[in-house]
Image (spheres, grey):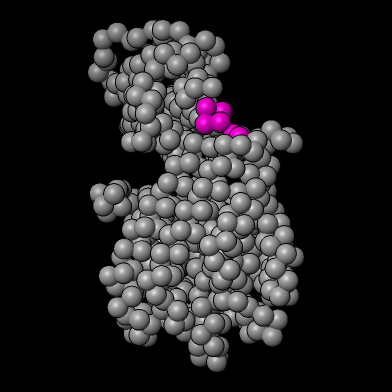
């Protein structure tokens, strides 16, 4: 786990800049709230709003990010009003919370913006429970949310908008469908059922902190697309929470709400959340748990019993999510894995064709964006296959095939990157054999994604010309891919029915 976070590649220091900017933006938001006379409750609400504005907004363009950020306060104000007005009516409050859960998950069908607004809506209702917001506090919290989002936007789009110097990323669109065939529709139903289970059992455990269980269910569903991914994420959430509780006992509990060390711990926790989010959900949850502990210390309610209750509520929430994905309209792992692998393979061919056209002298051929898209697709494949390669998976045969597929897809990507690098050289010459090799790659991809997976032709002796060397390696990797996929009776059988 340590190696995964601290040794993970960070091209362009993107994760480092992401985390450092978050500390700056959230710190500015809290300071501004304090300077205008906000109470501790307002400062906490503002800091969390700024955190969400910097963390959840993920549109591919800076302009899109700005539009989504501008929409956040409107959603937050509405949800906070509902949470506060229904605070004294538990049944109505609970039904409203479950409605926010369902709508928030369903909103993912509209892409990154829907996802961001759904997360912000849920978390504003959560903050209303966390801070026990009443109607009389609403004007102060409205001001805190608005000021904090403005501060976060000022840092993100003014002081430190490093995204302006980066190519616009391609966001992989999840497999579509209509009605109950759409993954977001199924997940919305699952989330409501899981959150309802967590809400009831959470209230049995605690009438004051029951919302922790609902929060655990919600976050288990974020960025997952199948029951396998959800089960793994639930396990990692509980593990990260337990580790965070252990860290809190060592550092947050002794601090006991002292302002200066608490501020330092908050900054460290925020940095940890943003820096580790892209590579380890377990580590991210450790820092989230530490942040919650420090905030409870500042509010004067942190005790060992409260930490034990958090573990129990988190476990209830994770169990609720796991039961929901197993029983309610399950989205099997093999369905999503099949879709992502096929899209990755087709992207391999598209990259190859563009690189070959570039080498042939085409002025319009540009494989660069396709290579970036391939990296994102491979990330989705790894996420989808994660349940198969998890150490607790007892199906050794499937685990081995899944690992083999990941290795060979990475090999394909490596050869494609090499080919694109050769094509980018203006002095590179075109070899007539490239067209034939590209045709063979297309045929191999077709066999792996459409037809029954038959043994593919293996290329002969390796050539010397650089572009052909990479094509040769790519053909080998595709031919080797036929074995694990054929052993599973095709791509869609990789993980079983």
Magenta span has 480?
no
Report whether residue 486 is seen: yes
- Reply above or below: 18 against 361: below
| Residue at figure coordinates x 46%, y 22% from the top left | 494
Report whether residue 70 is seen: no
Between residues 303 and 48, which one lies in front from this camera angle?
Answer: 303
| Residue 284: x %, y % from top left | 40, 57
- Reply above or below: 345 against 304: above
Q: Does 151 sit left or right of 307 as displayed? A: right
- Reply above or below: 369 against 494: below
Between residues 169 and 285, which one lies in front from this camera angle?
Answer: 285
| Residue 418: x %, y % from top left | 33, 31
| Residue at figure coordinates x 70%, y 81% from the top left | 135
Q: Does 284 sit left or right of 147 as displayed? A: left
| Residue 371: x %, y % from top left | 44, 36
| Residue at figure coordinates x 57%, y 76% from the top left | 131
Q: Over which residues does the magenta segment extend?
A: 330-335
Between residues 36 and 105, which one lies in front from this camera angle?
Answer: 105
| Residue at figure coordinates x 37%, y 85% from the top left | 259
Q: Based on the displayed image, in which of its 4 quarters is residue 359 positioned?
A: top left
Between residues 338 and 21, which one lies in front from this camera angle?
Answer: 338
Q: How many marks?
A: 0
**Quick one: quadrant of the C terminus?**
top right
- Reply above or below: 104 against 338: below
Q: Does 77 sit left or right of 36 as displayed? A: right
Q: Does 236 sit left or right of 182 as displayed? A: left
| Residue 396: x %, y % from top left | 34, 24
């Amino acid at each position: 786990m340590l190696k995964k976070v601290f040794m993970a590649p960070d091209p362009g220091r993107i994760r480092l800049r992401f985390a450092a900017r978050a500390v700056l933006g959230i710190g500015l938001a809290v300071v501004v709230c304090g300077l205008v006379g906000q109470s501790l409750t307002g400062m906490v609400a503002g800091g969390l709003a700024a955190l969400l504005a910097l963390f959840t907004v993920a549109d591919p363009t800076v302009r899109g990010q700005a539009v989504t950020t501008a929409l956040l306060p409107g959603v937050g104000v509405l949800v906070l009003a509902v949470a506060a007005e229904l605070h004294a009516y538990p049944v109505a409050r609970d039904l409203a919370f479950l409605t926010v859960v369902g709508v928030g998950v369903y909103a993912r069908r509209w892409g990154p913006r829907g996802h961001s607004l759904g997360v912000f809506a849920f978390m504003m209702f959560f903050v209303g429970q966390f801070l026990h917001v009443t109607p009389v506090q609403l004007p102060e919290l409205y001001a805190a949310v608005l000021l904090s989002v403005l501060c976060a936007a000022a840092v993100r789009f003014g002081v430190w908008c490093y995204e302006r110097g980066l190519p616009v990323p391609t966001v992989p669109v999840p497999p579509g469908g209509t009605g109950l065939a759409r993954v977001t529709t199924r997940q919305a139903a699952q989330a409501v059922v899981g959150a309802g289970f967590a809400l009831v059992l959470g209230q049995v455990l605690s009438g004051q902190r029951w919302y922790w269980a609902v929060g655990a269910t919600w976050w288990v569903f974020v960025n997952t697309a199948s029951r396998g991914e959800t089960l793994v994420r639930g396990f990692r959430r509980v593990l990260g929470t337990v580790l965070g509780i252990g860290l809190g006992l060592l550092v947050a509990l002794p601090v006991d709400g002292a302002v200066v060390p608490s501020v330092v711990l908050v900054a460290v926790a925020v940095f940890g959340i943003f820096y580790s989010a892209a590579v380890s959900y377990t580590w991210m949850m450790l820092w989230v748990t530490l942040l919650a502990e420090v905030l409870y210390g500042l509010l004067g309610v942190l005790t060992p019993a409260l930490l034990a209750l958090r573990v129990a509520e988190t476990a209830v929430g994770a169990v609720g999510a796991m039961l929901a994905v197993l029983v309610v309209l399950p989205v099997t792992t093999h369905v999503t894995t099949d879709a992502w692998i096929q899209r990755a393979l087709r992207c391999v061919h598209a990259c190859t064709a563009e690189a070959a056209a570039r080498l042939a002298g085409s002025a319009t051929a540009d494989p660069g964006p396709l290579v970036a898209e391939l990296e994102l697709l491979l990330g989705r494949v790894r996420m989808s296959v994660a349940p198969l390669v998890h150490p607790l998976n007892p199906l050794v045969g499937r685990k081995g095939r899944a690992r083999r597929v990941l290795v060979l897809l990475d090999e394909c990507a490596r050869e494609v990157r090499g080919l694109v690098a050769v094509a980018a050289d203006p002095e590179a010459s075109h070899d007539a054999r490239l067209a034939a090799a590209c045709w063979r790659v297309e045929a191999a991809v077709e066999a792996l994604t459409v037809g029954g997976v038959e043994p593919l032709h293996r290329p002969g002796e390796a050539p010397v010309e650089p572009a052909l060397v990479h094509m040769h390696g790519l053909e080998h990797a595709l031919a080797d891919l036929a074995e694990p996929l054929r052993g599973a009776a095709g791509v869609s059988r990789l993980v079983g029915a």
